[in-house]
Image (spheres, coloured by chain):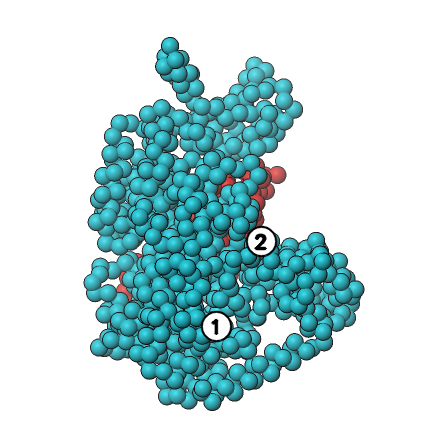
Chain colours: A cyan, B red
Amino acid sequence: MNARLLTLTSDAKAAWASEQASGRVRINVCLDTSSVAQGAEKTIAAMRAAITARSLNAEVGIVGTWGFCWMEPTVTVRSAAGTRTVLYANVTADRVDEFLQKVVIEGVDIPELALGVVDGLASREIPLLTDHPFMKGQIRRVMENCGRIDPESIDHYIAHQGYEGFGKALEMDAEAIVKEMLDSGLGGRAGGGFPAGRKWDFLRSATTSPRYLVCNADEGDPGAWVNRVLMEGDPHIIIEGMLIAALAAHADEGYIYIRYEYPLAFARMQKAVEQARAKGLIGKDILGTGRDFELIVFLGAGSYVCGEETGLINSIDGYRGMPRIKPPFPAQAGLWNKPTNVNNVESYANAPMILRNGAAWWSSVSTAKEKGTKMFTFSGSVNWAGCVEIPFGPTVREALEQYSGGMREGKIYKGFQPGGPLSGVVSGGLDLTLTLDPYREKGMFLGGGGLVFFDESVCVLDMCMFFVAFCEDESCGRCTTCHGGTQRAVEILRRIQAGGGRDGDIENFNSLVKTLVWSNCFHGQFAMTTIKTALKEFAAEFHEHIVEKRCRAGVCHGLIQYNVRSQTDSQLPAAVAICPTNAIAEERGQFTVNDGLCIRCDACREVAPNAMEVRDRFAARHAAAAAAAGG
Amino acid sequence: MVAEPTVQELRALVAEFQPQKGHVMPALHKVQETYGYISRAAIEAVARQLNTTPALVYGTVSFYSDFRTHKPAATEISWCSGPACRVLGGDRIRDAIQHTLELPLGGQTPDHSVGLHMGQCNGTCSEAPQVWVNGAVVGNLTVSSAISLARELKGQV
């Protein structure tokens, strides 16, 4: 092993050991975007203030997330002796005084806030964290450090086998590194599943230089935040992965392209790169080996198609982020028309442990065709919106029941959407596995790791409108099939939702499905997938909307009507007051809804559920049709 | 945010950036971070510094939804357009906020006090449905609480 790396490692381990032996209670608060949204900064400030004011024998640090993103701020408490660490949830600022009183001054646990024991012995009241239902079946590999180390400390990372995989790679030739990657079977983690080793080999075999590596951290699929968890929780694992790729592919310079919506991830990655540079891991003559590699953290500015690799490359080049026409592929002509390799955050993050522990170890966890573990985030009409790392293979049912806490109260499961706006929707599908093939067979894809569950109160045409309008908004404008086609699809959907569905609309959609696949990039090719899959999976709902003029979910504006149900209900004045368009007005002693003003926002029914009702707009017509059918 | 910059100030601000090095976006970010938006003069200064044309720089600016060519409002509401928010009633919230503020997405009140725009999901989906008010999450909204928030910001309470 490289002598300088050995010194860095032993120094970091010594520093870590002395931190652990501080004799003080160590409180680590998760500080990431999700926990900040739930008040983590206030928690930290309150803790620091109280510790100083009361001269408590405790110190406060920060960590990334454990994945319990719906019950932040999460906090670990390591005992002063360093023998036991407990993870707590929902430690908001108002709880801090009582929290410190118990865990620091009295030295007792708080079972009602505890999620589990991270290190040390379980108690009667607090089981081991690994026995928590949310943690069962999870295998934390890329997320191993998340929640355990300070993401802003390179020493913490190095003390936990950090840069050891890079150290091994330094002693291997490029072909051997590529072989190890190929043997592992690591497939692209953004959803394509293309072997990462093959991609690295393309760049290795390139004939010109300089060569570039790009880390795609543009995670634009709404409902997916796995890359954010990693960048905010353990940024160095990504840098180490890129350093290994640089050795394998003889790359000279790397870019980490982060979306504008992730300012904290951007700051953490920048800090991590600076720290790595200061330690001699990035820059000229890395660790005295004579090798050079520069790494630049790059901030996007809000564009979904920049997640497409050539759109991203154009964006770094300084142009509009319009995807290029392939070929040439990035491996031949990427950044500044030089050979370039683009991988996802999670793909790079797996490389360090493949090098450290070997391909056989790495691929042993999954029984599915896809090897290794995968991070997922779950959200929607469910109780928990969290982040997990599991081997490929569990079913959607397990994702829903075990990792998402089931549906919210009163919500009846309807379906889910994997992989973002281009991927499509599934009706039911609880027995599908979280692997690539079941979705490919449906003409969709599993994607980068986001799954959004929806319930019967969601109208599938409204879901189609959401995703197709997103695709329209984010179309780069190059292909008429895409920018014109998505506009056309939005127009038709809008007309159907307004009650103007007509014969031929389904054919119109099918024709758009067929023409959009001619588009240049994935964005256009898959922009109609939501409608294509919904037409199959939810055919009856399209028929109801277009022919019967009925929206079973009570969402589509032209097919429903709001009405005053009770003139005497005590909450009716509240409904009148909340209406943003003054649509509920009194006339000759009677309150009525002016249908032309009503925007169907449902605020009135929220505040006065017994006074207001939403009705089928064509109820009379439907009743007549039913009577005719019955007679 | 500071006062309207002079051409000299803009040129000095972007003097560190170089042509052909992927500096267009970083330069634009620096301008927006400093002055809150990217003015015509800033586009010309960036183009001059990076040895390219204002047309190309403007092409870049106009492509990305987070580059602004006008001053931000004092209070910026960013409505989360993500799917978790949507399935929990986010679109009704958008409609209600827009009608309360009488603004389209991307609009500003005439006195520049309140602006509304479309935000993208950043994965704080446990707070859905949500908006950001000057970057801070206001979550677990109902339509009625969103209307109350919008009225408050508009000074109507």
For residue B76, above or below residue A546: below
Residue type at mark 2 is Pro
- Which marked residue is nearer to the observer: mark 2 or mark 1? 2
- Dot 2 lies on which element? loop
Image quadrant containing the C terminus of chain A: top left
Please state which of residues B32 and B90 is positioned toward the viewer in this rendering.
B90
Query: Few, some or many C-alpha atoms within 10 Å of disc 1 (few <14, some 14-19, many ≥20)?
Result: many
Chain under callout 2:
A
Residue B156: image quadrant is: top right
Residue at image mark 2: A133
Q: Residue at 39% of width from left, 58% of height from top?
A: A368
Residue at image mark 1: A236
Does residue A497 appear to the left or right of A610 in the view shown?
left
| Mark 2 → mark 1, Cα distance in angstroms | 29 Å
For residue A393, above or below residue A270: above
Residue type at mark 1 is His
- Counting residues from the start of the chain, the first of labels 2 and 1 encountered is 2
Contact, mark 2 vs mark 1 (Cβ under 8 Å): no
Q: Residue at 46% of width from left, 71% of height from top?
A: A237
Residue A589: image quadrant is: top right
